[in-house]
Amino acid sequence: MSINKEFHDRRIRKSKAALKEALLTLLLQDELKDISVTSIVEQADLNRGTFYKHYQVKEELLAEIIRDAEADLVRAYREPYRNRHRFDVGSLSASAVKVFDHVAAYADFYQLIVRPGELAGLQHQTCALLRDLALQDLLNRTASPNVNPQLLAGFYAYAIFGLIVEWINSGFDYSADYMAEQLVEIIHQSQPAIIHRQTAGNDNG
C-alpha cells in the first residue's frame, strides 16, 4: 500500500468515525427525523461535501453504525472460543469475556437502543443476533436431551442482554471487568453443560 493511499484511507476512517460519533451524540438528544445533515456535519466539525462523499442520506450513516456495532458484537461474543474446536463453558474465565468491553466501546449506541424511541426495536434485533450466534456456535448437546436448543439459546441471549441493560441503567457504575466477572459467576453457579465449537466462517462475522 502506498503512503498516499494509506493516508487517504486513514482520512476516510477518521471522517466516518467523526460523523458516526456526531450522529450518536445528536440521537441522544433528538429523534432521527429531527436531525439534519447540516447538524451532523457541524457536530462533527466537517463540511457537507465530506458527508456526501460517504453517504447519500443520514439513514445510510445510521445503518453503517448499526452494522459496525453488530459486527463488533459478533467478534466480542466469539472471542473466548476463537480458534478453538471445543470449549467447555464451565472453564470460561472473566478475562476471556469481551462482550462488556464491546458495550463500553459502543456505550452511546447501547444507551440509545435500550430506551424508548425509534431505535428501541434494535433491542430485539440484538437479542436475535445473540440467540443465532448461540445456535450456530453451540454444539447441540446440553445437560438434558429434553432441553430445546433454540429455547436455551434464547434464554442465554436475553440473559446476557439483561445484564447489559442493568449495567446501562446503573449509569455504567461498574467496570467492564466487573460485569464479566459477574457473568462468569452466574454461569458457574448455573453449571450449564454446554460445549462451544468453532465453525467455518466464524472469523467472518
Image: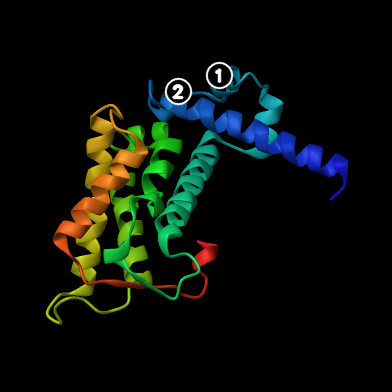
Identify the element where label 1 is drawn: helix
Q: Are marks 2 and 1 in contact (CB under 8 Å)?
A: yes
Q: Position of residue 72 (x, y in %)?
A: 48, 50
- Which of pointers 2 and 1 lies earlier in the amino acid sequence? 2
Closer to us: 160 or 179: 179
Q: Is residue 179 visible?
A: yes
Q: Amino acid at mark 2?
A: Leu
CA separation in Å, label 2 and label 1: 8 Å
- How dense is the environment of label 2, judged by Cα within 10 Å: few (below 14), some, or many (20 and up)? some
Total marks in image? 2
In-image side of 31 versus 163 (left or right): right
Q: What's the residue type where badge 1 is placed?
A: Gln
Residue in view at x 21 percent, y 57 percent: 187
Residue nearest the observer in this picture, 33 or 183:
183
Q: Position of residue 181 (x, y in %)?
A: 28, 46
Q: Please name the residue that numbered disc 1 is placed on.
A: 43
Q: Residue at x 28, y 50 (%)?
A: 124
Q: Residue at x 40, y 36 (%)?
A: 104
Please tell me whether residue 176 is drawn above or below residue 128 in the rendered image. above
Mark 1: give few (<14), some (14-19) or many (20+) Cα within 10 Å. Answer: some
**151 or 65, nearer to the observer:** 151
Q: Is residue 115 visible?
A: no
Q: Is residue 93 above or below residue 198?
A: above
Q: Is residue 133 left or right of residue 190?
A: right
Determine whether, in the image, residue 190 is placed left or right of residue 175: left
User: Which residue is more in the foreground, 77 or 50?
Assistant: 77
Which residue in the protein does label 2 denote?
A: 26
Query: Residue 169's spot in the image, x, y percent?
Result: 24, 31
